[in-house]
Amino acid sequence: MGKYEIGRVGKRGWSRLLVICGVVAGLAGPAGAELYGVFTDQLDGMEMLGRIDTTTWTIEALSAAKMDVGAYQTGVSDVDEAVGLFYFVANQGKAWERSIWTVSGYNGSYLASTLSATDLVTTDCRLMAVDGATGDVFLILGDATDMTKEALALVDPVTGTVTRIGSGFDLGGYLVGVTAFNIWDQEMYVVGNGGGVNHRIFSIDAATGVVNANPEITVDGDVIQNVVTLAYDEVLMRLTALLYERGGRSLVEIDPATGVATRISTAPIPENGLPGSTSAFDDTVGMLYYVAAVDGSGANGVFAVDRDGELAGSSVLADGTDYLLDTTPRLMGAMPEPVPEPSLVALQGVALLMLGVWRGRRGVARDAA
């Protein structure tokens, strides 16, 4: 057994405490996080990280150069809010390999590192989650020793080295990109069917890679097959999901131990079209953002849903940049302002990230199988 250790200090632990105290005491909550998306320039096919103004619904360009990422999986991304880093996996135009991309929310500078593993299929990477307490980046990859299974793994964003955790599990069919992470119980949540038909909520222990529970999800006593988005609210300490139902979507709270889902929305959020898994959650104010068709126009936009499951706003995005962007984000993430400035180094004329940012979280030791 190998040992992976990480210890970083943490101002975010204090910010969490202040947020929770503010909620308990009835004080005014903190300002919301900034929303970011990865957008494609329609002229050259390259990508860039853009900031989304959720008041005007306008895309604002960041200053760094665009990225030639190749192909990437819609929705498979996450953010480390404490240090302002946006992660996603793409192939850099090479079908036989995948790279993890780390992009600064401060100015769009980036680092791409090829994934490397001995007993995992790095090209089969469709689930990602970041532990907001430690900054650890988790992937779920195909198991090279048993092609019927998947396995949990840690990835080092600087080197691309992937470290397997545990012996693997069988999700059956699963929803690409639909994940959430519980920092308090150190569990990663994904939705699969276990080889059956109905949706199950899988709770995966981040330290051991063991599936702690995988009950069928039920709403009003009925098993379901219509989960489209997951989010873990770190302030209220609850797992929420959007369900695609007749007439729109409904926000529910899921008990991961039993699978019982309790409705939060008082009425469905009207929308048209079934979108993919592109979403982001801002737990500073409890706002869930996701991409869907707006106003029956067929044009995709961004929806915002508050903690009560009510629609707070929606709009097709406007391109406020000097580029010709496809205004539908394929990846999104929310990061609190101000985003920290990264340490930069010039390498072959491209500004790359030095990821030795100070954060000091509590030490975490994980067993790697």
Image (cartoon, rainbow, N blue to C red):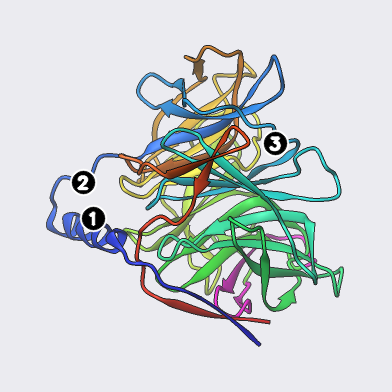
Q: Amino acid at mark 2?
A: Gly
Query: What x and y, as percent, mark residue 57?
Result: 43, 21
Report which residue position mark 1 lands on.
19
- Residue at x 69% of width, y 32% of height: 68
Which tag is nearer the camera, tag 3 or tag 2? Answer: 3
- Tell me how far mark 3 sits from mark 2, CA to CA: 37 Å
Q: Which residues are magenta?
A: 195-214
Checking the image for residue 29, the label placed there is 2
Q: Earlier in the sequence, mark 3 or mark 2?
A: 2
Count residues near mark 1 (Cα–Cα under 10 Å), then give few for <14, some for 14-19, many for 20+: many
- Tell me how far mark 3 sits from mark 1, CA to CA: 36 Å
- Residue at x 56% of width, y 57% of height: 129
Relative to 10, 70 lies left or right: right
Report which residue position mark 3 lands on.
69
Q: Label 1: state its secondary structure.
A: helix
- Tell me how far mark 2 sits from mark 1, CA to CA: 7 Å
Quadrant housing residue 23: bottom left
Count residues near mark 2 (Cα–Cα under 10 Å), then give few for <14, some for 14-19, many for 20+: some
Task: Give whichever of 166, 262 is nearer the camera.
Answer: 166
The answer to whether the residues at label 2 and label 1 have Cβ atoms under 8 Å apart is: yes
For residue 194, say whether it is visible: yes
Q: Amino acid at mark 3?
A: Val
Relative to 35, 77 lies left or right: right
